[in-house]
Amino acid sequence: MATFVSTNAHVSINAVDLSDDCTKLGLDISADELEDTAFGDTFRSRVGSALKDTSWSLDFNQDHASSQVDATLWGAFNTVVTVYANPATSSSSATNPRYSQSVLISKYAPFGNAVGELATVSVQWPGAGTLTRSTS
C-alpha cells in the first residue's frame, strides 16, 4: 500500500480555489446505527441505517483580498454551496479521488487570533446533500 505526505490538497468552495490558503482538510462521514438486539442475545447487535451524515472541517490562513478566504466565506454565509476536495491536486483519478458535496455555511468567525499570531480561520460545516466520490 502506498503512503503519501499531504502537501498538495485541492480545496474549492463555491467555485473558488482556496487551496493556497488551506492548511487542513477534514471530512467526517458517518451512518446512523440502529440496535437490533433481541431477547436471548448476550451481546448487543447493530445494523447500519440508510441515513448518512457528513461534516467538513477546514483550516485556512486568513486572507481578506478579493476572491480569497474572507470574501468567499462571507459571501457564502448562511447559504448552501458546493465544496470540492482532492487529496492531491485538482485532477481526479483512482489514486486521487474527488469528494464533492453541498454544505451549509452555518458558521464563520473571521477573527479570533491574539496579538502576534498568524491570522487563521477554522470552520466546520454540515453536509447539505449527497456526498459524491469521483475517480475520473
Image: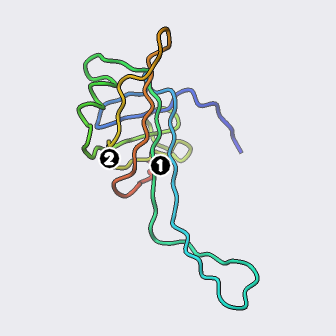
Colouring used for the render = rainbow
Residue for point 59% across, 31% down: 6
Q: The residue under label 2 is which amino acid type?
A: Leu
User: Is residue 99 placed above or below 109 in the rendered structure?
Assistant: below
User: Is residue 70 placed above or below 25 in the rendered structure?
Assistant: above
Total tally of numbered discs in the picture: 2
Which mark is first along the chain, 1 or 2?
2
* 126 left or right, relative to 117: left
* 71 left or right, relative to 126: left
Residue for point 42% across, 23% down: 112
Question: Depth check: 81 or 92 in front?
Answer: 81
Residue on which the image places disc 2: 104
Mark-to-mark CA distance, 2 and 1: 25 Å
Q: Find residue 1 and report its image quarter.
A: top right
Give the x, y percent position of residue 106: 32, 43
Residue for point 30% across, 32% down: 73
Residue on which the image places disc 1: 135
